[in-house]
Image: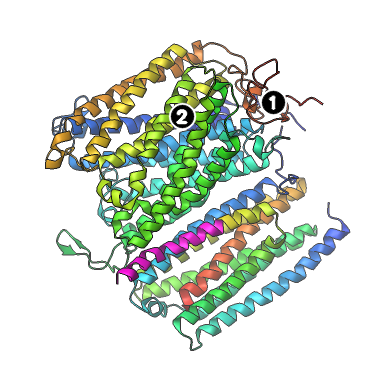
Amino acid sequence: MSSHTHHDEPFYRKYIWSTDHKIIGLQYGFTALFFLLVGFVLMMIMRWQLAYPETPVPIIGGLLGDTGILLPETYNALGVMHGTIMIFLGVVPLAVGAFGNYIVPLQIGAPDMAFPKLNAASYWSYLVGGIVMLASFFTPEGPARAGWTGYPPLSVFEPGQTIWLIGMVFIITSSLLGSINFITTIVQLRAPGLSWMRLPFFVWAQLVTAFLLVLAFPPLESAAVLQLMDRVAGTSFFLPSGLVVSGEILNVSGGGSPLLWQHLFWFLAHPEVYVLILPAMGIVSEVIANNTRKPLWGYKSLVFAAVFLGFMSFIVWAHHMFLTGMGTAMSAFFQTTTMIISIPSVIILSALFISLWGASIRFNTPMLFALAFLPMFGIGGLTGLPLGIGASDIYLHDTYYVIGHFHYVVAPGTIFALFAGIYYWYPKMTGRKMSEAIGKLHFWPSFIFMNGIFMPMFIQGLAGVSRRLWDGGLESAHASGVLQWNEFMSISAWLLGLAQLPFIFNVFYSMKFGEKVDENPWDSTTLEWTAPSPPLPHVNFDNIPEVHREAYEYSVPGRKRDFTPQTVPKKG
Amino acid sequence: MDIPYTVEERSDTGLFNAKLGIWLFLASEVMLFGGLFSAYIFLRFGAPDGAFHEWGQELNIPLATLNTLILISSSVTMVMSWASLKLQDIKKYKLYMGLTLLCALVFLVIKYLEYTAKFDHHIFPSTNTFFAIYFTLTGLHGLHIIGGMIVLFYLWIPGRKMWLSNSEQFTNRVEIVGLYWHFVDLVWIFLFPVLYLL
Amino acid sequence: MSTNHDTKDIQQHIKVYMIVFATLAALTVATVAASYLDLSRGEAIFLALAIASIKGSLVASYFMHLISEKALITWILMLTAVFFFILMLFPMTSFIDQAQLG
């Protein structure tokens, strides 16, 4: 076996056209963080209009037209792009592309992903998709503005949708290539001795996620193809006969149905929710096990819950469609499956809570984010139940309540978990820790302002304020009692933006000035901590590790140290 | 340190990496065409009674039957080219691979004739939902043929030098591409009756 | 590399491929012929899909070697098949309800 020396690779091979999973992971990470920032800025602009309707936006108002006021169509476009960028270009690439790429091969003791070139292709396809999305801001038509769900018939006529669909096709392709790679890597490249039940939970979460992406994304791709055909070739997949637009009957063959899009879209988009949340649960499990210095409580039930969750997520999609005229029989079926799918989520959350019991917890920055994830995700999950029941959903559908619900899952939920992951694995990537003091300066304001943004949304939503109003409910009588919250939420949002500055500073500052640490600064058991920090280019480990025990042997009575790495042989 | 199991099989799964990878890819392809097939069912249900059958009468069944036979033949020559490699017979491999490409080319030519005949009769994707889904399904299938041909051509001429350096991996590559090629054939086996005969 | 035993195996395979090829061709002709029979709509659909399924499984089993493939692949495909059928069923969901209302 050759031990290639890769030291003499030129810069562009090492950092740009790289096939090393660690470099690709970092490329994914930085690109995704950039897109998270973009998506966040778009939302901060929208929040100005909601807080102070029809007043000129400060600072960037000049970009929005002569008056500086955010126009309704621009507001809609920003809404679409905020959703698209946050989900498809921010959170998923960060959770799966970045953490999956960097950590999974290390945690299973592999030298790289199974298909390194495919891995690079996946990143570049993602980048092209992202650039296409960004480019849509600079086209004469402007970006898509028919809702991030792209519902027809509106989406067939609104300008900007074509370029959005093309961008989506690139992003979907990237996800498919990536997830095929993940599954193959996890199945084939596990180190000797690393049997399925010895895998860290994070790897399990990534495996289930990859299966969801492989099987649920293609129907959306076919839906995107159909919508492109509707827009470009004049077909009527989603256009019913006799459709009237602006007072005139449309000159198309008709015979299609907007419902077809909704079915195909939600067939992906519900599993997508679990694509967003499972890797986050994985990260939180790693951080919690490490900082409670205890084995995860109920490891096996966590694994089975995650697998069951993945399976069930394919048969709940129509709970997004209770208001489409579905009859009671189908509604009853889908609300039953929706109630069932909450069980594995509760199992996972409970297991993580119980893991805290009786532990002497280390409250470092990653742990603070992981701890905050638990109640935040809990709120997000529990507020979902009324939306999963047809009767209450009829009232709450399309109100700010829905926005509050899923943002609790994804923003203080998943994004906090991602922050936890960044603080936790940063020493592995750089050989230095991120500053704890600045980290806490990042955590506490983020935690407070996140709730400041999203908690009032439940109040507004329960009052019936629609999520799509350009004026934030100014002209709606039923909203008058809860309008004062708009300004409060907007200020919270801007302060949340401010609270991210310490984080950005910390990432770059600690690269140079962070505390230097050895390869296992957190006294962790899993395999990635046996590799040098940063792991060797292309090979990761000095020697392929051999695994002798389960993933979380913390504080085993009678041992000298309170952790036993997976590579330590069992005696006798 | 090279990536393990690129050529040899891992003992507990019995697979080399690309074998698993291609099957996962094919699984995603099943779901991709699944989305379109389900759109077909949806539109057929929504159309007036018997309309889909009537609209389908415009299609040319003899040509499509011929095309089905050609595609099946290309599947056979594909599997034969792999078997030739297994028998260490690179000459036969070249012959069968060439035949596979030829079949694919003929398939596309016939498809082109069918399309132009439709356009001449002023039948377009926008004509009705049947032709919308007909053009989308066959078009996407055609793209799969073209994509497959590019890879087949690579393995036929420029990529063949690997046979000398690493014959086992080359045989694996041919097997993997073959799996994809048979899948494209398999899709057509369902497209043919669904679009032309029902 | 390839032993005598392997060679025999492959030659056996080739015979099978030829039989499958002939069967596929015959079934193609059969399905076209069946479409000219005087069958009801439902019967015609059932017959055509049944023949297509037989052809499809022949291709998958012999050309794609699924019949002797490892268990893991079979499991993945079975999972895919389940989701494929769910995907096929959802058009029905919309129409079941309409039938109820109608």
* Element under disc 1: loop
Read off the chain for label 1.
A
Mark toward the viewer: 2 or 1: 2
Name the chain letter of the residue that bears numbered label 2: A
- Inspect the image, locate mark 2, and give the three-letter code of the amino acid beneath it: Leu
Going 51% across and 51% down the picture, which residue do you hit?
Answer: A215
Question: Amino acid type of disc 1?
Answer: Thr
Q: How many badges with numbers are in the image? A: 2
- The location of residue A198, given as percent across then percent down, is 66, 35
Which quadrant holds residue A375? top left
Crowding around mark 1 (Cα neighbors within 10 Å: few <14, some 14 to 19, many 20+) is few
Q: Is residue A26 visible?
A: no
Q: Quadrant of residue A464?
A: top left
Q: Which residue is mark 2?
A: A418
Residue B175 drawn in magenta: no
The circle on residue A5 is: 1
Residue A295 spot, x, y in % from top left = 60, 27
